[in-house]
Image: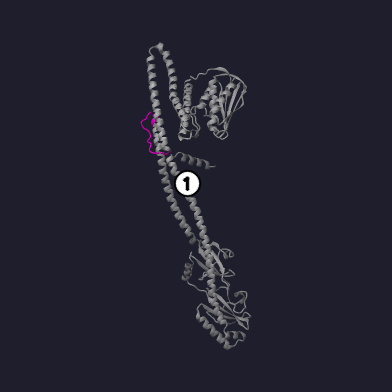
Amino acid sequence: MNTTTPNRRKIYFAFKDLTIQQRLPVFICLLLLTVVVAFSWVSYLSVRKASMAIGAERVITLTDKLSAIFKQSLDRFAASVGAVASDNNIKAYLIAPNASDRAASLDTFRKYLKKDTANKLLQLVDSQNQVVLSSSYYGLQPRTIIDSLIMPGKGKPGYYTVGKIILFKGLMYYPTVAPVTGNNKTIGYLINWRLMKSTRQGVEQLGQLLGGNGKVYFGNDDQQFWTDMIRPVEKPPADLRKLQQVAQYSRKDGKPVIASMRKIPGSRLLVLVELSNASFLETAAIFLRWVTVIGIILVVAGSLGGWLMSRNITRPLHQLSLAAAAIADGDYSSPVEVDRNDELGKLAASFNIMAARVHAAQQELEQKVEERTKELQTAITDINDQKESERKKDEFISIASHELKTPLTTLKAFFQLAGREMPPQLKSHSFISNASRQLTRMERLIADLLDVSKINAGKMAYNLEEFDFDKALKDTIDNVQQISPGHKLVLERSAPVMIRADRHRIEQVIVNLLSNAIKYSPEADKVLINSVLHGDKLRVAIKDFGIGISKKHIDGLFNRYYRIDGSQNRFQGLGLGLFISSEIVKGHGGSVYVKSEPGNGSEFIFELPV
């Protein structure tokens, strides 16, 4: 079951029920909130991406530098081993072992080991890969296979290498191998087994120097052994080929890291540097927090500003509403205060002028009504005068309608004269034209109200006569065409038929339907008219290409004062034209109906008996 549409409707109607003073700050708040959230998120992602790029560059740089630093350190160790390997007694012992050379070589071994306690064992290996001389340390006697220790290129004079790390009785050792040469050829190798030791404090200090909660790991190039310089550890949970550049992964503690690995030149060792992702993303997190705080401040400030702005706009509108309600109740003593020069100020000034004129017209009309009432009261003296009284009542209705039209006609004439005398380029000229059109609309409304009164009282009379409907239809179309040049009224077919009806009222129906078609098709440029004989009925269809009508409104379309939701905001009127037209057609024994779809125009059809 889809609940999305009902939820959206609830939100829409909830927003629709808000006042203008409430809508503006809510809209500004939502707009600012959307902009702030979108900007904050996009900016955060950009800063995060830039921070990770900086982290990747940093870990690569640190790895390269550490590789170079450890290379220099290993070079120093290897140079000292190479100096021992160049001892003549050692060379002589390899060529021709004897007791004196052995004693001298062991003495050289002991002196070398005393210089640095990290050097634990020296082994002299002949060209057949056999240990011929060794200094012992706590039983450390690793199996020595030269091919597994040294790098390709062995045997070259001055060549040395650092071999793989081994674990022996819980301690880690790595060998430094230097060739022993004689007569420009390698006659054996001297291997120094050095203890890899470090304290936790030293490792932590190195991590602090690296920054970003950095950690350093060493491993063999066969990737079978890794250590953090304190104890053996598991190998990195990542493809080691990717580590040649940069890789991201998480160890058992679950914290993501960014890492890079390099091989230490001249050795069988790898160095791996890991930096915590959190250290690089901290900047992005701080940025997001600041942007969020600033965004909240902007949303609050914008909402407050929107509320003040809406209050400034709606206050004069509220005054206009109160004044209009007072006028509706007959109170003209509360004009709207004009204290501004913008559009609302001009509207208030125009409203005060309109109220004054309406008040004057009302007083004049009340005076005349009072005079006519007195005449009627004095005229009703006896039964013989009753008919005269009834006649005067009818005359009163006629006079009242005439008196209502008289001030409007005078005002309209004044506006027309003012429009002719005023240059068109003045802004006031458009105001005069608008006012004149409104007066014409009021005249039509008065006529419609009188017709409605007659219909309600059952006094709508029809002057039946026989006339040529074809000619009447064409004449009516021509009259409407003159006042509506923006639309082309096309008579596609017209039935030549004589009918007996009230010609004026039938023409009124046609005018109402044509005016309705023109009004509700502002984007179209034509209206189609057809009249045909259908059995014993004359069928007249008027089709427009306007906004159309939904099915839910068609049933009530011909009711008195019926307006489609929202149409009153775009199209003026009281909703009487279709009601009056329907009653006239029904009064002639006919019927009227409509065919329409939203967006596809409407077709109004009425039928009259022939």
Residue 92, quarter of picture = bottom right
Does residue 320 lie above or below 280 as drawn?
above
Q: Is residue 333 magenta?
A: yes
| Any part of residue 586 in sight | no
Q: Between 610 and 439, which is closer to the camera in this rendering?
A: 439
Q: Is residue 389 magenta?
A: no
Q: Between 73 and 268, which is closer to the camera in this rendering?
A: 73
Residue type at mark 1: give it.
Leu
Name the residue at the top extreme. 384
- Quadrant position of the N terminus in the picture: top right
Question: Is 402 placed left or right of 266 in the picture?
Answer: left
| Any part of residue 474 in sight | yes
Residue carrying label 1: 31
Give the overall secondary structure of the magenta segment. Answer: loop
- The x and y percentages for residue 576 are 49, 27
- Quadrant position of the C terminus in the picture: top right
Residue 554, quarter of picture = top right
- The x and y percentages for residue 199 are 48, 72
What residue do we see at 52% from left, 82% from top? 112
Does residue 398 lie above or below 151 as drawn?
above
Does residue 555 lie above or below 3 as drawn?
above
- The x and y percentages for residue 123 are 57, 80
Residue 415, quarter of picture = top left
Q: Which residues are magenta?
A: 326-342
- The x and y percentages for residue 71 are 55, 73
Name the residue at the bottom extreme. 100
- Mark 1: which secondary structure? helix
Colouring convention used in this rendered image of the protein: one colour
